[in-house]
Amino acid sequence: MNYAFIDSQNLNLGVRSMGWRLDYRKFRLYLRNKYKVEKAFLFIGLIANNQRLYTELQSAGFILVFKPTIRYFQNEKETVKGNVDSELVLHVAAIEYSNYKQAIIVTGDGDFACLMEFLIERKKLLQILAPTSKYSQLLRPYASFITQIGELKTAIEYKKTGISGRSKP
């Protein structure tokens, strides 16, 4: 059985930088159908006002792993940051390690390069899904494992139908 480990901020910001929104239900189905992902862990910052989002993500089939967030001001604009890197690595390399056959890592962040090396050495890396083509140079040695999520847009893009705001199936 395969597990997916998702850096939610990297995924969300990457997809939005390309001008579209991800349909998380479609994305979860894609992971299940394409990679036989039994469990999909979504590492996400915990913000009090986002309960509706968290409920929707859980109902789409994601297991949420929360990280406290930090608020700060940058260029006179409030920014919220939840750095999930260490939690994702801990789950992949220790907490869930014996429970999955292979891992799908969803990120374009070079901080995970050592994790990719760790998984490849143990033949446990199935795929890296990079949110954009502008993923970190540190991930270039693993290019044969990388699929750019932008290539999947037609299958996983959120499309508002006008009927109760739901996405098309």
Image: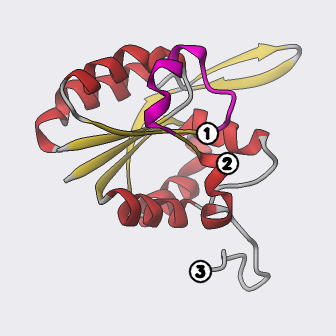
Marks 3, 1: nearer the viewer:
1
Query: Coloring scheme of the render?
Result: secondary structure
Q: Position of residue 25 (x, y in %)?
A: 51, 66
Mark 1 highlights which residue? 131
Residue 144 inside the magenta-drawn segment: yes
Distance from label 3 to label 1 (Cα)?
A: 22 Å
Above or below residue 55? Residue 145 is: above
Residue at coordinates 46% horizontally, 63% vertically from top-left? 30
Marks 3, 2: nearer the viewer:
2
The span picked out in magenta is: 132-146
Q: Three-letter amino acid code at disc 3?
A: Pro
Q: Position of residue 136 (x, y in %)?
A: 60, 19
Distance from label 1 to label 2 (Cα)?
A: 7 Å
Residue at coordinates 67% horizontally, 37% vertically from top-left? 132
* Secondary structure state at the residue bearing disc 1: loop
Left or right: where 166 falls relative to 41: right
| Mark toward the start of the polypeptide (3 vs 1) | 1
Residue 141 inside the magenta-drawn segment: yes
Q: Residue furthest bottom?
A: 163
Above or below residue 85? Residue 52 is: below
Residue at coordinates 27% horizontally, 31% vertically from top-left? 92
Which quadrant is home to the N terminus? bottom left
Residue at coordinates 88% horizontally, 13% vertically from top-left? 75
Mark 3 highlights which residue? 169
Mark 2 highlights which residue? 150
